[in-house]
Amino acid sequence: MTTFVDPIALTADLIRCPSVTPTEGGALILLEQLLSDAGFECTRVDRGDTPNLYARWGTKGANKSFGFNGHTDVVPIGDLDAWSVDPFGAEIKDGFMWGRGATDMKSGVAAFVAAAIDFVTHTPPDGAVVIAITGDEEGPAKDGTVALLDWMAENGEAMTHCLVGEPTCPANMGEMMKIGRRGSMNIRFRVVGVQGHVAYPHRVNNPVPVMARLMDRLSTHVLDTGTDHFDPSNFAVTSIDTGNTATNVIPADCTAMANIRFNDAHNADDLTAWMRGECDKIEAETGVTVEMSVSVSGDSFVTPPGLLSDIIGAAVVAETGVTPELSTSGGTSDARFVKNHCPVVEFGLVGKTMHEVDERVEVAQIPVLKSIYGRILKDYFA
């Protein structure tokens, strides 16, 4: 039986698996073997082209079941020539381990897998420890953690609390955990007018200034000034385009893209209704037609400070001497799905280089993160 797992070596082994979404790359095969050897009951929960792994040590349906969630898929490397190292080489130099996924989040996965194996081997808990890992966090996220949670519900599996091991610290180890996230929605607008020659403006209905007016109204509207745990919501225009290359033609239509990051003062349905109302107003004012389509990545959520954040915070202080800030900043993560299953908090290492060329992790942080995760398990089951 495995008695000790080196999280640094495991991080390197995972980086060497070229698991660009949705390719499995050998990462989940490696983890399944390691966890199975340590006594975890492992199940591949693949759905569509997405590889997923569920592993449980202990009794199904235990009153206490602590879960770790993470992903082994990584974003593409981009321009290979821009890298100073092999992006899947896991080279160690200057105190860092270099490679795609080093920060986001193969080091986090390695740390919680190593901590979980050591914990159940040396201090078997009265309860269950769950590892839920997807290969689709960086992609569409439709058949990853969502598929794992669906399978758990169908098979009587459950977590009573969950920690997502995403990198959460901006600059220094231990300084931040995430107790929630803002919601996110992408919106596509299309304003349809009447095309014609620029010399005869009375014969056309130009959609471009109408789109500009609509985007100005939406982006300058104050959605809120923030809430107890969240920064203010914001509407950001990301593109306005006609596809028109002619200088003497007024185009027939104009498209725009936007994103809203919203806090717990709103939900996606209310924001959609607000935008549609503004579209209807500008249609009535100008005679154009405005089409709108919305894609919601997730609603906002917060896990109120309490048992889970207290245990995590105490473990971070004990291992680093740093008291983590409780934050809801940043983008989205799979915690937005886990929150429908059980209380969830995110904590991981420093994420400054995630998704960058020459992504790297400070080697010394990896065993510290393992120690924090191990202490969390010990205190949770105490």
Image: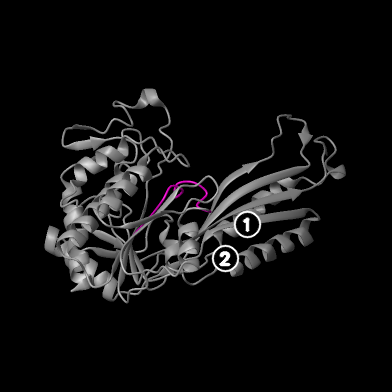
Tell me: 375 left or right of 195.
left
Image position, residue 92 (x, y; %) = 20, 33
Q: Amino acid at mark 2?
A: Ala
Q: Position of residue 291 (x, y in %)?
A: 73, 54
Amino acid type, residue under disc 1 in the picture: Val
**Vertical side of 146 occupied by 9: above or below:** above
Q: Which residue is at 52% across, 65% downward?
A: 222
Q: Is residue 294 left or right of 114 when viewed as pictured?
A: right
Judging by the rendered image, the residue that carries numbered circle 2 is 268
Horizontal side of 190 relative to 234 (left or right) equals right
User: Looking at this view, is 62 or 262 the one in front?
Assistant: 62
Q: Residue at x 40, y 33 (%)?
A: 77
On residue 202, the disc is none
Determine contact: label 1, label 2, CB under 8 Å: yes
Quarter occupied by residue 59 = bottom left
Q: CA distance from mark 1 to mark 2?
A: 9 Å
> Which residue, as the protein is rendered here, is positioned at the far top?
81
Q: Quadrant of the C terminus?
A: bottom left
Helix, strand or loop for disc 2: helix
Image position, residue 192 (x, y; %): 77, 48
Badge 1 is on which residue?
294
Question: Which of the pair 274/50 is nearer the observer?
Answer: 50
Residue 133 part of the magenta segment: yes
Q: Residues within 10 Å of mark 1 (few under 14, many from 20)?
A: some
Residue pushed farthest right?
203
Q: Quadrant location of residue 69? A: bottom left
Q: Which residues are magenta?
A: 131-142
Question: Majority secondary structure of the magenta segment?
Answer: loop
Q: Position of residue 362 (x, y in %)?
A: 20, 42
Q: Secondary structure at mark 1?
A: strand
Position of 128 relative to 174 (above/below): below
Q: Is residue 129 magenta?
A: no
